[in-house]
Image (spheres, grey):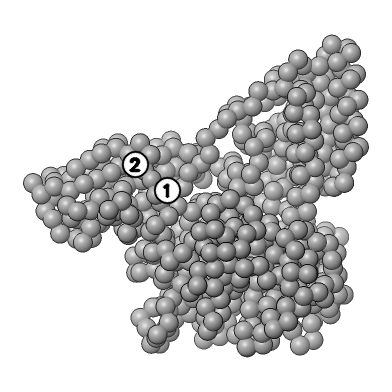
Amino acid sequence: MIELEPNLGWINTGRDLALGGELQGQVVLLFFWDAGRIGCGAALGEAMSLAARFAHEPVVLVGVHDTRFTGLANLTITRRIIEHAGITFPVVVDDAYAIWRKYTVRSSPTTIVIDPAGEIAARASGEGNRELLERTIVRVIDEHRSRGTLATGRLAATDLEPSRSVSGLFGPEKVLAQTPSVGRPGYLFIADTAEHRVIVAHWPDAGGSATIRAVFGDGVPGCVDGVAGEARFTHPRGMAFDPERGLLYVADTGSHAIRLIDVAAGTVRTIIGQTQRGHDAGGGASGTNQALNAPWDVALDARAGRLFIAMPGVHQIWSAELDTMVTRAIVGSGEEDVVDGVGIKAAFAQPKALALSTDRKTLYCVDSEGSAVRAIELASRTVRTVAGGQRRGGVSPLDSFGLVDGDQALFARPAGLSVRDAGDGGDLLVADAGNGCVRQVDRASGQTATVEPNAKLGVPADVCFARALASRTEQPCVFIADTHRYRIIRLDVEGPGWTEIGLAGLVDDWPDAERAVFNVPMHEPMKMLVPGVCGLGPGEGACFRVSSWSDEHEERVVCQRTLTGSKAGREQEFLVPEDCVDAERTLLVQVSSEGGARRSWLIRFGSDGGEPRLRA
């Protein structure tokens, strides 16, 4: 019997499980995988269908999750990854591959059947093994029932309360900024992936507050066209905006489709894809006649009428001609690797982000599993590796990752990419998700440096450079989708300052809010003290949010900040602007830890004077 330890903890159980304990007498289906690998999806579906097939037998599906990347080796972050994936079965978080090594697991995914005595009955790697595993489970059940060693019932499920986000976001994986210009509004587009929706917000003010223009998707997965409130997406991600036409292109990953949002009309329609996973590695069909495989990001060349599509499901980059919607592969053999070359002689490893150079001649992408930054010269379809993707000492680029700067840079599952304007350095910005940081890469030399913002990032899944315009006062800035901290951050390019974006209109309730009255002078700025959160785990954060309400409508986010460690445990000071200190308005103060603890206060104002301090 090989116990499931050492580990970083258990998810979806509320307690630790052991083969020699509660799992004894059960048939245990151990599923070794990494939720970040797109190739694990089909095998995960098979494992879940097997668990459903034996729902009335003592058969338990237990996930063993890989934590090979430093930035993801955190129980709180892994819990959110698991929750966003919709996984409800028990999961043990492996500690530096310890359990994988004990079970001699060498590839992801791998499924192992453990009999009621704790011994290995069968193992299978990859996908397409459902029938083999089903036959094994039936045999094991029959054998141990006849011996009297099979448990009489299935392990009792644990109902856990889903985490809530005081920011209103729930797993934003992509962000796109359209800087305002004379006669044209600015927008912030957010793919709130885990909530199956796309948010269109107005340009945030200096304090980071932004109001919602529209939300496309109702939180239920699906592929439904129509107006904003009726349309549905399934894990939407990358976006590209055509400001001249007001059209937003969206890579709807889970729907295997490209969707088009008309921002002014408030409508959604499907323009490419059959809404089912395809395995075509060439393409050539038009629009909804062409099947796609998990499109992850898009880049638009509006002048040429071309839309580029990152397709990690087949390890290729595709292109669509927008006048005919003919869509086909332009580079990538379909093999998962990091190989330079021309056209289909090149190879990619799950390309998940795209960025077009300002001269429209070069398309950049990040190979997530290859931990590399790649460049495609569009005229010749020549692919070269800019940084990362090291192949040294016989080690595959798929196993060559880390946090190393310089001309021999290493990355760890990068997920987002943006091109800075030539006048602002001309570098690439990379969201290095597995390392929990942002990197800056010289496009010519590959020289790489780590950007050091004061904000403590969790898992940065995307980065977007927003250029400054001479006709306005905005300075160049960078927006970051910090996915598992449920937030969007704005970084100042000229300095270390950062602001957390507060989206007014996403929060619609305040469960169990405590009531308070502040008797202070009306229409004067007010400093307010909010108690901190104690007892946070390693790397765990807490979000503090103050918003102003009028007529049961959230009209403005006064401040939102997420802090980690001892900083989150201290009393926080917020400055409430004078226009929010009004007898007609209400303040909603919310504090939420990443571990799930939550507290809120609903505050009204009087005019007799007093101390604006909330008590812990």
Residue at position x 38%, y 59% from top? 504
Q: Toward the viewer: 53 or 494? A: 53
Tell whether 228 sits left or right of 46. Answer: left
From the viewer's perspective, is residue 233 above or below residue 63?
below
Q: Nearer the viewer, residue 576 or 139?
A: 139
Nearer-N-terminus badge (2/1) = 1
**Residue 450 seen:** no
**Residue 384 position in % (x across, y down):** 77, 77
Classed neighbour count for the residue bearing mark 2: other residues with Cα under 10 Å, few (<14), some (14–19), many (≥20)? many
Kindly indicate whether the residue at mark 1 contacts the one at mark 2 (C-beta within 8 angstroms).
Answer: yes
List x then y, in percent, for residue 51: 76, 33
Q: Which residue is labeled 1 in the image? A: 166
Residue at screen point 68% across, 46% down: 67
Q: What element does badge 2 sit on?
A: strand
Q: Is residue 543 left or right of residue 377?
A: left
| Residues packed near mark 1 inside 10 Å, few (<14), some (14 to 19) or many (20 plus) | many
Asked if residue 251 shows in the view, the reply is yes
Which mark, by number, is residue 600?
Answer: 2
- Quadrant in which the C terminus is drawn: top left
Image disc number at residue 598: none
